Amino acid sequence: MIRHTVVFSLKHAAGSEAEAAFLRDALVLEAIPGVKKFERLRQVSPKADFAFGFSMEFADQAAYDGYNEHPVHTAFVADRWVPEVADFLEIDYAPL
Amino acid sequence: MIRHTVVFSLKHAAGSEAEAAFLRDALVLEAIPGVKKFERLRQVSPKADFAFGFSMEFADQAAYDGYNEHPVHTAFVADRWVPEVADFLEIDYAPL
């Protein structure tokens, strides 16, 4: 199991329609083959300067690679992520 | 639900007995009241400069506060975390 997480902040104003649209439209990622336990989350620690997070799990590296290369994912990155995300950090976990 | 995560690296050499001892001894945190779904994880993304992670969930802020203030937690932070951890970032999530 690989848990892929990304914590991020948007360029959009908090509570804006553009913010809501980004979070809503990100649901296209959930339907990509291999994606399990897809979650859209609010980052709530005052110690971290990020507002949101996505988390998903893959059975193995092959499933993760398939997600990364999937045209729905690459289109979301190019059309939405790059222009709308201000800052982010990817953190991936595997069992110890 | 609040998911408390901390991604970190240790001062110990990779694969060392000191590293193994830290990860083993951290299991004391799992027994603190209110802690659910405690996980010890390996951080595997080459894009993040951290080696490990802990993840746990709390039913609400009161349970999280109880954990933070619990003497087993404060002792672990003082006696093990502060001297043995080289770098860390806390990221907490709540449902969107």
Image: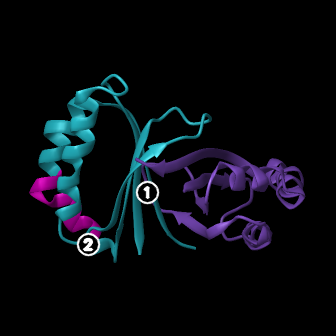
Chain colours: A purple, B cyan
Q: In the figure, is residue A41 to the left or right of B28?
A: right
**Mark 2: few/some/many CA within 10 Å (<14, 14-19, 20+):** some
Q: Share a chain, discs 1 and 2? A: no
Q: Compared with residue A25, is residue A44 higher up or lower down, i.e. above or below?
A: above
User: Tag 2's secondary structure?
Assistant: helix
What stretch of residues is rendered in magenta? B63-73
Chain bearing mark 2: B
Kind of residue indicated by mark 1: Ser
What residue sits right under mark 2 in the picture? Answer: B63
Chain bearing mark 1: A
Residue at coordinates 41% horizontally, 69% vertically from top-left? Answer: B2
- State the image coordinates of residue A81 (x, y, percent, origin top left): 79, 53
Residue at coordinates 62% horizontally, 52% vertically from top-left? Answer: A6
Residue B82 image-quadrant placement: top left
User: Tag 1's secondary structure?
Assistant: loop
Residue A45 image label: 1
Residue B46 image-quadrant placement: top right
Q: In the figure, is residue B48 to the left or right of B10?
A: right
**Mark 1: few/some/many CA within 10 Å (<14, 14-19, 20+):** some
Q: Compared with residue B9, is residue B52 higher up or lower down, i.e. above or below?
A: below
Tell me the chief SS of the magenta region.
helix
- State the image coordinates of residue A95 (x, y, percent, origin top left): 44, 51
Seen from the viewer's position, the closer of residues A91 and B92 is: A91
